[in-house]
Image (cartoon, rainbow, N blue to C red):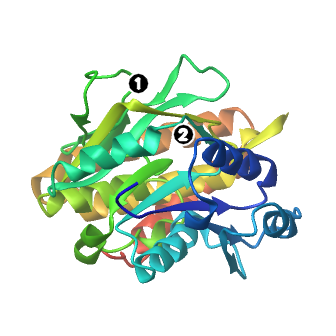
Amino acid sequence: MQYSVAIVILNWNGWDYTQLCIKSLLEAGYSEDDLIIVDNASTDGSIPNIKKQFPKAHLILNKENEGFTGGNNRGIQYAIKKGYAFVLLLNNDTQVLPGFLERLIEEMKASEKLAAIQPLIYYLGAKDEIWNAGGDYHAWLGYSQTNYKIESDQPYLTDWISGCAILVRSTVLETIGLLDHNYFAYFEDVDWSLRMRSQGFELKVHPQSIIYHEAGAASKSETKGVEGFLDPKVHFLNVRNQVFQLRKYCVGPKQWLAWPFHFAKFALFIIYFTLKGRHTKSKAVIKGIKEGLKTPLGINK
């Protein structure tokens, strides 16, 4: 490959997924030397396993769980310091097909205006079903929507790119900055994408570049409890970070439509969880609203 690409993989108690992800990369012909594995203070034995099975990969050990944003930022900073032209953020619960990265690079080489690009992402457990084909952003509603249909058989523009697999040009990061650490997880990819587009850059999806994703591996329980399958913290983060988005991007006339739209949704969440007896989730939504309103906003270049 003519251009240097660092592949950043974030691990948090996900050794079973991480090893399969890395094995798929190596089987596809990518070098272990270009892997940057960031561990968010795992306690499942991930660290010794990574050191043993993938000794050539660079391993960054965080003392605490810094979330999707903080963990990936560590990897990005290391990649930029090492002089990589491109950085690929890749979820540890993904598996890749040969040639997926070369297709992304070729499209990036064609235009300096292209800041980032993603592959077409299918479900790992249902390989004919699309998990993410890019996303639309409805500015007047402050609403980000995932696309589940391919718009073209050729690379096409998109409003935002999933953080599950995003190839970013290193020089662009000098302009727009890293992921906003305030988000921790969820909506950080939409924020990053909007910041790129605000500086005149383009984003694309490449439908001929294909990977598979085990959706929600880090946030869903295998057994249903009183609060359901999904961790209440996920609802807290989603609500809080959506409020961040409103504060950042829905100002002026947009606020009169976007804010009532989302707060009506939050109210419905609270009512639904209360009726279901999922009181921890109701409290998580309320806490998300409060934290979203009072937390100082992060970078917004």
For label 2, the crowd category at 10 Å Cα-Cα, with few meaning under 14, some 14 to 19 and many 20 or more, is some
Point out the image quarter for the C terminus. Answer: bottom left
Left or right of 211 in this view: 138: left
Residue under circle 1?
148
**Image point 53% across, 19% down: which residue?**
129
Q: CA distance from mark 2 to mark 1?
A: 24 Å
Disc 2 marks a residue whose amino acid type is Phe
**Image point 63% across, 61% down: which residue?**
32
Earlier in the chain: of badge 2 and badge 1, it is: 1
In the image, which disc is placed on residue 269?
Answer: 2
Q: From the top left corner, tell me how far across and down residue 105 is, in percent.
A: 33, 49
Is 153 situated above or below 248? Answer: above
**Image point 67% across, 46% down: which residue?**
21
Left or right of 200 in this view: 228: right
Disc 1 marks a residue whose amino acid type is Tyr
Residue 300, image quadrant: bottom left
Left or right of 84 in this view: 226: right
Q: Nearer the viewer, residue 185 or 33?
A: 33
Q: From the top left corner, tell me how far across and down residue 224 is, in percent.
A: 82, 34
Q: From the top left corner, tell me how far across and down residue 230 is, in percent.
A: 70, 42
**Is residue 47 at all visible to an observer of this figure?**
yes
- Residue farthest to the front, as pictured: 2
Check disc 1 and report its element: helix, strand or loop: loop
Q: Nearer the viewer, mark 2 or mark 1?
A: 1
Is 150 situated above or below 132? Answer: above
**Image point 57% across, 43% down: which residue?**
270
Q: Nearer the viewer, residue 257 or 63?
A: 63
Is 94 situated above or below 70? Answer: above
Residue 194, image quadrant: bottom left
In the image, which disc is placed on residue 76?
Answer: none
